[in-house]
Amino acid sequence: MTDPDLPHGILPYQSIEALIADRAIIAETPFTGIQVQPASLDLRLGDSVWRVRASFLAGKGRTVRERLEDVAMHRLDLTAGAVLERGCVYIAELQERLALPPGVSARANPKSSTGRVDVFVRLLTDHSVAFDDVAEGYLGPTYVEIAPQTFSVLVRTGTRLNQLRLKRGDSGPRRTTSVGVDLTGEIVGFRARRHAGVVDLDHENGHDPRDFWQPLEPRPNRFGVGELLLDPGEFYILASKEAIEIPALEAAEMTPIDPSVGEFRVHYAGFFDPGFGTEEANAVGSRGVLEVRSHETPFLLEDGQTVARLVFEPLSERPSRIYGFDGSHYQRQGLKLSKHFKPWD
């Protein structure tokens, strides 16, 4: 049970560091200074990844390792790096193991840089019946499913693809805001090129964006409103119409809208840490970047159309560091590709 004397909510930077010090989160290699974020923890790939023939969940009473034996095709060594091919599914054990205290649960999401290159990742734990959710008091290893959708990617031991948000108890009522899409400006978005090269996920500012992306110009309709036709199976980078601000005492997750109002998926990487876009961080006007993929049918987006929602939850206490303390690539952003690419001239 959750200790009633301890504050409920998303755990901030200092609480995550305390869990590491108390060995509620452990790893064979030392934690790095950039892993702990204001309200999340970056997770690192271990030494091996398995190519599998199908995605799976462990299920009650079973471990990921046991299920892996049924679907594994071959193992890749990550210590010298390995290319994960687009269209394939992989499972990797992460370096971090959990021994969560009673009342503490967790939820994972792809990092922003992972989602922006269309790599679909999901956390797996032993005995789990859902991806990304970690039961309170969980004791055991962590794994990640990796499915590159558009680009093949180069990863290695220590590459950080996803992040963990920890929570104590029930944080109470949550508030939501709508997020619209911005289809104004000289360039309104980018569409991924299907037959591009390999993206090295540890190489920042090292890829020419023209080799991977096609810029999209605004196309107003007969009403003078910008619009964009989403082609099925294509991947787009767009930006939010609204500036996004995450107060220091809250964290947020961007979630898809109801599919009844549009057959497309928005935002693989859903976590926004406290301090993003705030005056305190000198980042007023920061936009949310939207990773968009249409489903089976073409869909016509209009400027300002609601495409996602931000769900805010309170922190258990103010974080000792807010977003951008380490010089984040995405603070004060507008329409922006992942940090792997050089700026678009």
Image (cartoon, rainbow, N blue to C red):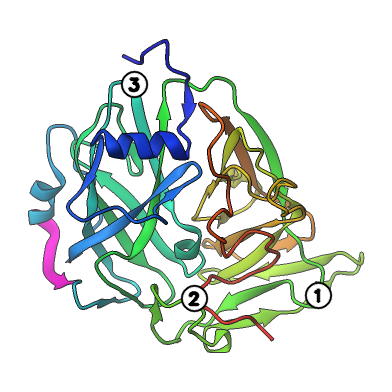
In the rendered image, residue 71 lying in the magenta stretch gets the answer yes
| Residue 36 seen in this snapshot | yes
- Tell me the kind of residue under disc 2: His
Q: For the residues marked 1 and 3, what is the alpha-carbon distance in whole angstroms? A: 51 Å
**What range of the chain is rendered magenta?**
70-77
Count residues near mark 3 (Cα–Cα under 10 Å), then give few for <14, some for 14-19, many for 20+: some
Q: Is residue 40 left or right of residue 77?
A: right
**Magenta highlight: main SS:** strand
Nearer to the camera, 250 or 27: 27
Q: Name which of mark 2 and mark 1 comes first in the sequence.
A: 1
Q: Earlier in the sequence, mark 1 or mark 3?
A: 3
Residue 319 percent coordinates (x, y): 53, 37
Location of mark 3 (residue): 103
Q: What residue is drawn where x is 24% and y is 77%?
A: 82
Q: Which residue is mark 1?
A: 219
Q: Residue at x 11, y 70 (%)?
A: 74
Percent from the top left, x then y, of residue 33? 39, 55
Instruction: Identify the residue at image location x=41%, y=10%.
Output: 4
Q: Horizontal placement of 30 versus 68: left or right?
A: right
Task: Label 2, secondary structure: give it.
Answer: loop
Q: Position of residue 255 (x, y in %)?
A: 56, 44
Q: Is residue 227 magenta?
A: no
Location of mark 2 (residue):
340
